[in-house]
Amino acid sequence: MRYSEQEAGVLEEVIAIRFHTKVTKGGRKLTCAALVTVGDGRGKVGLGYGKARSVPMAIEKGTKEARAQMKDINLVGDTVAHEVTGRHGSARVFLKPATQGTGVKAGKTTRAILQVAGVHNVLSKLYGNSNPMNVAKATMNALEQMNSVEEVEKLRGVRVRLFHPQAREPVPAAVEADEPPEESG
């Protein structure tokens, strides 16, 4: 995996590179494929897959596709908004918000996508298939399912109070500590 900053604020990370050889009458033909994720570190992320005869060209094609498919995701601070499970094929990725200082507790593929998206504190678990392509698509599916507070309020028709590790509202003090409780008599 590698990071590169090609434009101001755009992070790129190569998740996986695959090689495929086809034997023909004229000899062997080598083909490379690259799975790339691109994000701005502030809630936008995209996933791309490029194939070419050389690794740099495959990475370039994957990056171009990832930039074209960038999507906004709903974050609360530097973690995910709520618990969610993303699915693709037989891979399932579970994401859960975490408190400040936890870090990104995730596998290689999920970690790459979350880091370029700007998620710094999250817990995750992978169930089923561990193929990087399926895991990447399941992670993107989970991120796309994230709802913002405004979306939930509109959907339910009620005001939502957010009890989140990084976005807690101050709790009003009901009774001052200096006052003794009233006795009934």
Image (cartoon, rainbow, N blue to C red):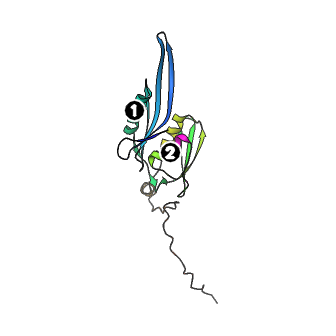
Q: In the orientation shown, which residue stands out farthest toward the left? A: 8
Residue flagged by tag 1: what amino acid is it? Answer: Glu
Residue flagged by tag 2: what amino acid is it? Answer: Ala
Task: Check disc 1 and report its element: helix, strand or loop.
Answer: helix
Total number of numbered discs in the rendering: 2
Residue 82 at what x, y percent from top left? Answer: 51, 53
Residue at horizontal 53 percent and vertical 77 percent from the top: 174
Task: Check disc 2 and report its element: helix, strand or loop.
Answer: helix
**Quarter-wise, where is residue 46 in the image?**
top left
C-alpha separation, residue under disc 1 versus residue under disc 2: 26 Å
Residue 137 at what x, y percent from top left? Answer: 49, 38
Residue 11 at what x, y percent from top left? Answer: 41, 43
Q: In the orientation shown, which residue stands out farthest toward the top? A: 25
Give the labeled residue for mark 2: 142
First in residue order: circle 1 vs circle 2: 1
Using the image as rendered, state which of residue 154 and residue 76 is in the foreground: 76
Q: In the image, is residue 150 above or below residue 129? A: below
Residue at horizontal 50 percent and vertical 42 percent from the top: 112
Using the image as rendered, state which of residue 122 and residue 145 is in the foreground: 122
Give the labeled residue for mark 1: 60
The label nearer to you, 1 versus 2, is 1
User: What label does residue 173 carry, if any?
Assistant: none
Residue at horizontal 54 percent and vertical 81 percent from the top: 176
Tell me the magenta residue range: 102-113
Screen quadrant of the C terminus: bottom right
Circle 2 crowding by C-alpha within 10 Å: few under 14, some 14–19, many from 20: many
